[in-house]
Amino acid sequence: MHKTIKTTSRRSYTWLMRGCKTIRMLRQTLSGKFLWLQFHRCAVSDASRKCMISSMATILTNFSTRIFCQYSILLDLLSKDDFDEYLSYICSYEKYVQIWILDQIEQHLSDGSKVSEFEDQHIQSSIIRINDAITKAKMQKSDNVKKFVEDICKELGGKLVISQDALGAFMILNNADQETFAHWLTESVNEMGQDLREKFNESHILIKLYHLPVKPQNELFSTLIGCGKQCPFCKSPCEAGGGAHSEHFASVHRPRGLGKYKCRYTNKLVTDICSSLVISDARFHCNATNHTLHPFKDYRKMFQTGKSLQMAAFRHQTTGNM
């Protein structure tokens, strides 16, 4: 009988310890899962974004004016002395310049030690912010784990939004001890910091750029280049700056042949300049005119019809301004 009682007691104790261990592991697993699905995304995005902001600020300093940036692009184009590069610049201007800016970002971040230092600073900053949010949430004395998690998210503001489905995963631990849950969560955050450092070191800069919600090359293009529109005749880029302008402008025009215009009789690229043609009696034809002849003087009527055509009317003047 005593042996039976001892065996039963030992078995009960074993099951109790297993149960406690299971609950403890479950708490650790769920807190870790919560972290990796939510905090990991938050920290990666925040650290990457800050690194890119630092890089963008440096590039903006290097190219202090729009004219200097365009000059640098043309100088680089000239040094390559490659027909396909010229063709890409003229026919796919916006794409070409965005790729060029992306190359500048990659060159700026090519110094691995410098990038690692930036990333480590921003990762540490993100980890501190998350741990502070956990500490402040603990002070709220929440009624349950779900409310505790919501308080953490509230402390982090808009940097971390948890869906209701994700919060539902914590209902199994809703009445668990918050101190224990917070302990495992804090440990997971600190472990995440090291994991992030390793992942950042292994990732190529282009992969990091790809996962950013806002592409730095697009932001720099808008700041340094402007709207990206081109003259419908010679493909000179707009110099008006930004995107909020009703009229495009370019200080210098080029021969129309660079805009793929050919003589209808010889099929050769033409060399005349559109800023002179718009005050002449000459006529042109293109896809926009359904290949019927149209007076250069009335080019605005043609390119301003419909909704904001890509070849929107440029301002032309004979004094050098367009």
Image: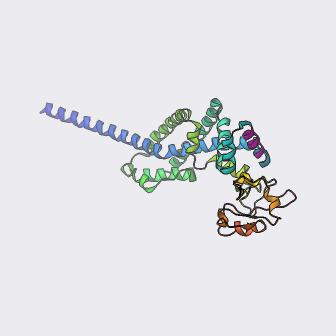
* Quadrant in which residue 109 is drawn: top right
Q: Magenta includes 77?
A: yes
| Colouring chosen for the image of the structure | rainbow
Q: Position of residue 237 (x, y in %)?
A: 74, 53
Which residue is at 48% across, 37% downward? 187
Q: Between residues 7 and 216, which one lies in front from this camera angle?
A: 216
Quarter in which the C terminus is drawn:
bottom right
In the rendered image of this protein, does residue 270 appear above or below residue 130?
below
Number of marks drawn: 0
In the rendered image of this protein, does residue 173 appear above or below residue 193?
below
Quarter in which the N terminus is drawn:
top left
Q: Residue furthest left?
A: 1
Which residue is at 72% across, 61% downward? 244
Residue 267 can be seen, yes or no:
yes
- In the picture provided, is 38 more to the left or to the right than 241? left
Residue 308 can be seen, yes or no:
no
Which residue is at 63% across, 34% downward? 115
Q: Residue furthest right?
A: 319
Q: Magenta includes 314?
A: no
In the rendered image of this protein, does residue 99 appear above or below residue 3?
below
- In the picture provided, is 185 more to the left or to the right than 55? left
Q: Which span of residues is magenta-colored?
A: 70-78
Q: Position of residue 163 (x, y in %)?
A: 46, 55
Q: Between residues 275 and 115, which one lies in front from this camera angle?
A: 275
Q: Between residues 256 and 189, which one lies in front from this camera angle?
A: 256
Q: Position of residue 200 (x, y in %)?
A: 55, 35
* Quadrant in which residue 319 is drawn: bottom right
Q: Position of residue 78 (x, y in %)?
A: 75, 39
Which residue is at 60% across, 50% downward? 214
* Quadrant in which residue 235 is drawn: bottom right
Magenta segment main secondary structure: helix
In the rendered image of this protein, does residue 134 appear above or below residue 282?
above
